[in-house]
Image (cartoon, rainbow, N blue to C red):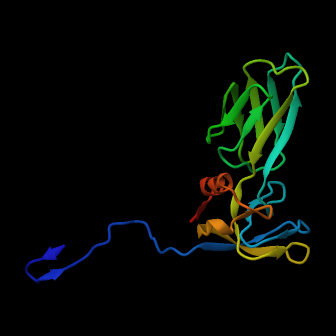
């Protein structure tokens, strides 16, 4: 803005985004004796204990087709569940998570992200003996900033909000892939650069 009377120029910031925001780091309690986690590990929380654990992708069998039943219900082991990661299949029919707790595709269903309760109704009865499997990721909560040996120590600092270096991210001691990073960004306020 230019003030002709005073011959001054004034600048006014219009952005509500603070581009220089430092990361938010909190100390989380981890499950004892759950191995050594390296710096950069993506971590989650266990719904039963509310303690931090290593982030992981899971695959579980929740039932077996008998040629007549179309409905299957279960509670997934590694809740809370990450948004848009749930895929249920009988080997022929598939339902996927739309990110809002609804399973869509060859039938219908729901997923409770917090508890891991999943309910599906296939369009056609799965074949006799067909395994009903669910693949998903447990919901990430942050990125570990130090190496942690959980046999010696059970708390460590974790980035909960901010940016992290993409090439430093780990899942189960392996470099995080693009899908893992996408899950991290969709389920937290952490962004990989």
Number of marks: 0
Residue positioned most to the top: 68
In the picture, measured across the screen, residue 99 lies left or right of residue 122, that is left
Residue 97, horizontal then vertical, whole percent: 66, 38
Q: Residue 9, position in %: x, y?
A: 18, 79
Residue 12 location, quadrant? bottom left
Residue 70 at x, y = what percent? 80, 21
Residue for point 74% across, 66% down: 41
Q: Examine the image and state in which quarter residue 120 appears.
A: top right
In the rendered image of this protein, does residue 169 appear above or below residue 108? below
Q: Who is closer to the viewer here, 50 or 121?
A: 121
Q: Nearer the viewer, residue 158 or 6?
A: 158
Residue 75: image x %, image y %?
82, 41
Q: Splitting the image into 4 quarters, where does residue 96 fall?
A: top right
* Residue at 15% across, 82% down: 8
With 149 as the anchor, is 168 left or right in this view? left
In the displayed structure, 54 sits above or below 13; it is: above
The quadrant the N terminus occupies is: bottom left
Quarter the C terminus occupies: bottom right
- Residue found 11% across the figure and 83% down from its top: 7
């Amino acid at each position: 803005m230019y003030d002709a009377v005073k011959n001054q120029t004034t600048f006014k910031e219009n952005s509500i985004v603070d581009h220089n925001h430092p990361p938010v780091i909190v100390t989380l309690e981890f499950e004892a004796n759950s191995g050594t986690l390296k710096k950069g590990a993506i971590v989650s929380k266990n719904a039963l204990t509310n303690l931090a654990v290593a982030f992981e992708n899971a695959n579980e069998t929740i039932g077996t087709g008998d040629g007549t039943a179309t409905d299957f219900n279960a509670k997934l082991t590694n809740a809370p569940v990450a948004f848009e990661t749930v895929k249920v299949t009988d080997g022929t029919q598939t339902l996927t998570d739309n990110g809002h707790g609804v399973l869509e595709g060859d039938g219908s269903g729901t997923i409770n992200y917090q508890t891991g309760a999943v309910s599906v109704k296939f369009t056609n009865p799965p074949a006799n003996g067909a395994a009903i499997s669910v693949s998903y990721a447990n919901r990430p909560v942050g990125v570990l900033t130090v190496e942690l040996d959980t046999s010696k120590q059970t708390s460590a600092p974790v980035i909960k909000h901010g940016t992290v270096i993409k090439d430093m991210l780990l899942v189960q001691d392996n470099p995080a892939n693009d899908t893992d990073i996408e899950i991290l960004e969709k389920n937290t306020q952490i962004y990989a650069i």
